[in-house]
Amino acid sequence: PLTGQILQRISRFTVYPSSHYVTPRSTTLRAIEAIKEELRERIEFFQRENRLVECQRIEQRTRFDLEMMNEMGFCKGIENYSRHLSGRKAGEPPPTLIDYLPPNAIMFIDESHVTIPQIGGMFKGDRARKENLVNYGFRLPSALDNRPLRFDEFERMMRRAVFVSATPSEYERTHQAQVVEQVVRPTGLVDPQIEVRPASTQVDDLLSEINKRVAVRERVLVTTLTKRMAEDLTDYLTEHGIKVRYLHSDVDTVERVEIIRDLRLGEFDVLVGINLLREGLDMPEVSLVAILDADKEGFLRSERSLIQTIGRAARHINGRAILYADRVTDSMKRAMDETERRRNKQIAHNLKHGITPIGIVKTVRDMIDGVYDADEAHAMLKAAQEDAVYESMGEKELTREIKRVEREMLEAARNLDFERAAKMRDDLKKLKQRLFIGLEIVPGAAA
């Protein structure tokens, strides 16, 4: 489109909508026959069970889908018939993008302690939902084969894998061949010092620690066990003059990024959360992580969760973590021992090479690039400025500007500069709309 060069003359070309499928007609007809056979077996099953409602439902829905496939080549929810369309047998794994990887490919699994369990969870969640659809006559049993991979199927495809995690789980430990530790930081920053304090006075003690950090313009993360406790703590800190906000599961991704950005910019000083202050948060301004009720054993206070949460203060040169607990649990002890091991290793490395720890300086924009596009924002600003100029023009000025833009548009089109011509066309449309609005509001203009 830029040069206008003709590469090939095509007399006819079909562009398929994204909702249509390009399965060959013969494959579709073969699948229809297989679906009819499965439908017949399912109808007989429901009739034997005297489940007439389910029998009528599956027959009506499936026959409608078959009619659509026969006439149009596709139907709504056609993915539920993928087993018949691909010619797979019952229970065979579905095709995935992993099938396209070469035999010598290396698979990197980031945050593997979270990712690995989710792979198995995807299949089980999908299965539980679709079994209800099948049992109540909404779908044929073959719909169960439109599914994610089971973990054992995925495992067979992991020819060579690298698990990346700060807190490897039991699976990685039992399947590891070679371990490469990346504990030493080139900045010289050490893991935070950990202190255990009584849980009975945790709120008042936390308020005192927060005031110390606020005085030197540092940030604080606080993690609680429940949403109610996070809300109550936020209210309490607000009453005592602390600028605080809290994260919870109802906050969407964009708003979550905005909250973290505001924390880094100093819009508020304390962020309270439950299970959202773990992996993937890089906030160099945070110097204190406070873990309330650290001795309550469970998912949120496991060894891995504690290490991940403590690590949120590892980006600050004065990083510290306070665990509020009335007793030291096994998870706490293991987490503290591992953090201390990493801390000692970094200190020894610093002494050996004469490294002085340097705090991380990271612009806030780095973290929000994925949400806010700087180029798009600049384009929007420029468009707003142009609109403001058009609004300030009178009727005669608008008429002259319309003629000028029209000349430039035609000139750009003659020069095959279609991108500029398209922009001129959009500007011309705005100007004509502005002129039309101006004429409408002038008394007597219509006469």
Image (tube, rainbow, N blue to C red):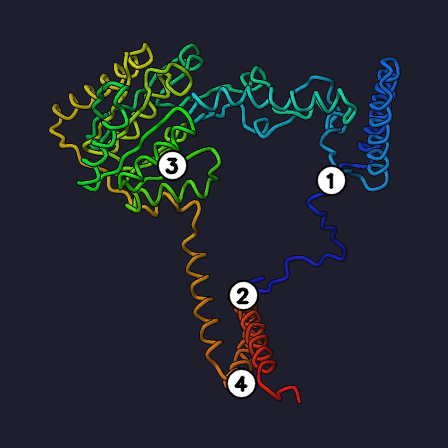
Q: In front of the other: label 2 or label 4?
A: 4
Which of the marked residues, 1 or 3, is nearer the chain's N terminus?
A: 1
Residue that mark 1 sits on: 21
User: How packed is label 4: few (under 14 Cα within 10 Å), some, or many (20 or more)?
Assistant: few
Question: How far from the left and from the top, in percent, is residue 190?
Answer: 21, 27
Instruction: For the residues labelled 2 and 3, say whether their Cβ atoms are less than 8 Å apart.
Output: no
Q: Residue at 43% of width from left, 21% of height from top?
A: 113
Q: Give the labeled residue for mark 2.
A: 419
* Residue 386 point in image, percent of width and height: 46, 71
> Which residue is disc 4 drawn over?
395
- Residue 2 occupies which quadrant of the picture? bottom right
Q: Amino acid at mark 4?
A: Glu
Q: Cα distance, mark 1 to mark 4?
A: 53 Å
Which sits in the foreground, 174 or 199? 199
Residue lying farthest to the front in this orientation: 239
Label 3 element class: strand
The x, y position of residue 324, in whole percent, is 27, 21
Whether residue 55 sits left or right of residue 264 in the image: it is: right
Which numbered marker is on residue 246? 3
Q: Earlier in the sequence, mark 2 or mark 4?
A: 4
Q: Could you tell me how far apart the alpha carbons at marks 4 and 3 are, in whole angstroms?
A: 53 Å
- Relative to 370, say whether 149 is above or below: above
Q: Few, some or many C-alpha atoms within 10 Å of disc 2 (few <14, some 14-19, many ≥20)?
A: some
Report the amino acid beneath label 1.
Tyr
Tag 4 near tag 3, CB within 8 Å: no
Quadrant location, the N terminus: bottom right
Compare marks 2 and 1 and give the one earlier in the sequence: 1
Q: Amino acid at mark 2?
A: Glu
**Residue 12 place in picture, x, y as percent:** 76, 55
Q: Secondary structure at mark 2?
A: helix
